[in-house]
Image: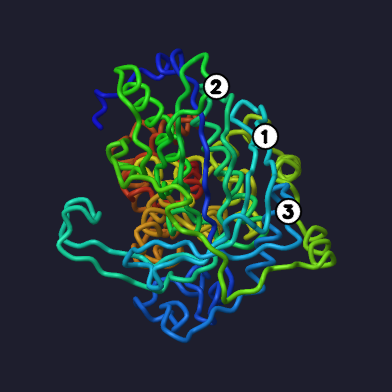
Amino acid sequence: MAKADLMDYDKALELFEPVIGLEIHVELSTNTKMFSDAPNPANSDNHDVAPNTLITPVDLGLPGSLPVVNATAVEYAISLGLALGCQIATSSRFARKNYFYPDLAKNYQISQYDEPIAFEGSVPVELEDGTTVDIPIERAHMEEDAGKLTHLGGATGRIHGAEASLVDYNRAGVPLVEIVTKPIMGTEGLAPEVAKAYVGTIRDIVRGLRISEARMERGNLRVDANVSLMPRGSTQLGTRTETKNVNSMRSVERAVRHEIQRQAAILAAGGTIQQETRHWHEDKGTTSPGRVKSDADDYRYFPEPDLLPIEPSVELVASLRAALPEAPAVRRRRLRETWGFTELEFRDVANAGLLVEIEETVAAGAAPAQARKWWTGEIARLANAASVDAASLVSPLHVSELISLVEAGELTDRLARQVLEGVIAGEGRPSEVVASRGLAVVSDDGALLAAIDAALAEQPDVLEKLRDGKVQAAGAIIGAVMKAMGGSADAARVRELVLERAQG
């Protein structure tokens, strides 16, 4: 739907109360898949492998193959449930969710339906102004992922209009935990911000548990955003839409806001909302129809006959609870005190969703202030320009190395920005980009003196001012040398040499 079909956001809130619900799929970083011993491509060691090479007969649903539950995945799911404040079921079981799609070789997905591993939880989420909203969790259940389709020949990369589709079953069988909220009401105009903050909190939790890389751009963490509107004065929930696989926190916020405005325009004009999935278009900031959304009955759930119920012992649950890391709110307080940030500085970092990146950059050896400067400054700028999350551009390890090169005097900030662009472009780690692009700071006195003499020859009056004690005049020569050498000169050494020339 075009932008012109959207209702003004404030007007939409006057007429309707937004109700949101979020479903987050977390890929677990186990060594093997959920029900087979095939390597798990969600594990960081298995990215960028050839299609259809990380598969077994179980993943393809071949006759006679039987699933076996991944015990580590179960422990990860329990840990996540505990971190979400959920109750852990003494007995849960898998079910078959029946539907046909080319990337689901068995024609059914092994999931959990009415007996999930974790249920009835709550997660506190901090908003930009420091207020906290409790998000009610309905369930967190285990399941396997489907494969991946690549549609060829169309203009959008989607199946509509494509000439052919390729299927890669490497992802089939990857362990997932799906976290489902209850309807989130009462957030009013903050609904988009609440959705974004909740996704960021979940990302922080799963990273803290070390059960997933939770990189949205890689699909380790995928978000389906449900939105419906209730007319003011009504208690009847409206018909919801489900915007599928939104792949950044910024996009979650934008997609929820867009759906509120789109649905309000339709309802105010006397129309009805179709219960359907929708696709988010990052470039246009709009959603488009996907398929009519099925209800649970349409999937013909029934208990998985090839798997026994999951019955974790009291001792196992207790040991996993004892091993839980800090809650996100406690961790934020500790980090702020440890890093010495002001409340405003820390809130900027938290609101940008960069706590994990800065923490890992500091752990790799960078000073907290420098890590904050680069992540919230140049990296954030480049991310905004590309409409992606900053975490997807560069690794904390590379940012730490970049900072160390600046601190060692081998790069100026200007040169470091060029190095950063090279790292993001895939040219290697910072030291490799410095070497390949020839970006190291020039500190050789011979080269610097030649540039200084050339600058003094063009500005002979500067030398006289320096000899008269006007030291600030050196800035003109330093600037000229830096410009002539493309920012690669060691500014501090240039200043020393200029003052020596004045004395001589």
**Closer to the camera: disc 2 or disc 1?**
2
- Which label sits on residue 441? none
Looking at the image, residue 161 sits to the left or right of residue 466; the answer is: left
User: Measured along the vertical axis of the image, is residue 252 above or below residue 218?
Assistant: above
Whether the residues at callouts 3 and 1 have beta carbons within 8 Å, the answer is no
Label 1 belongs to which residue?
134
Quadrant containing the N terminus is: top left
Q: CA distance from mark 3 to mark 1?
A: 16 Å
Q: Is residue 194 visible?
A: yes
Earlier residue among tags 2 and 1: 1
* Quarter occupied by residue 422: bottom left
Task: Determine the residue positioned at 73% across, 58% down.
Answer: 89
Earlier residue among tags 2 and 3: 3
**Closer to the camera: disc 2 or disc 3?**
2
Give coordinates of residue 374: x percent, y percent.
51, 45
Looking at the image, residue 199 sits to the left or right of residue 416; the answer is: right
Task: Determine the residue positioned at 83% across, 61% down.
Answer: 318
Label 2 belongs to which residue?
235
Q: Is residue 404 visible?
A: no
Residue kind at label 2, given as amino acid type = Thr
Crowd rating for badge 1 (residues with CA inside 10 Å; few <14, some 14–19, many 20+): some
Label 3 belongs to which residue?
82
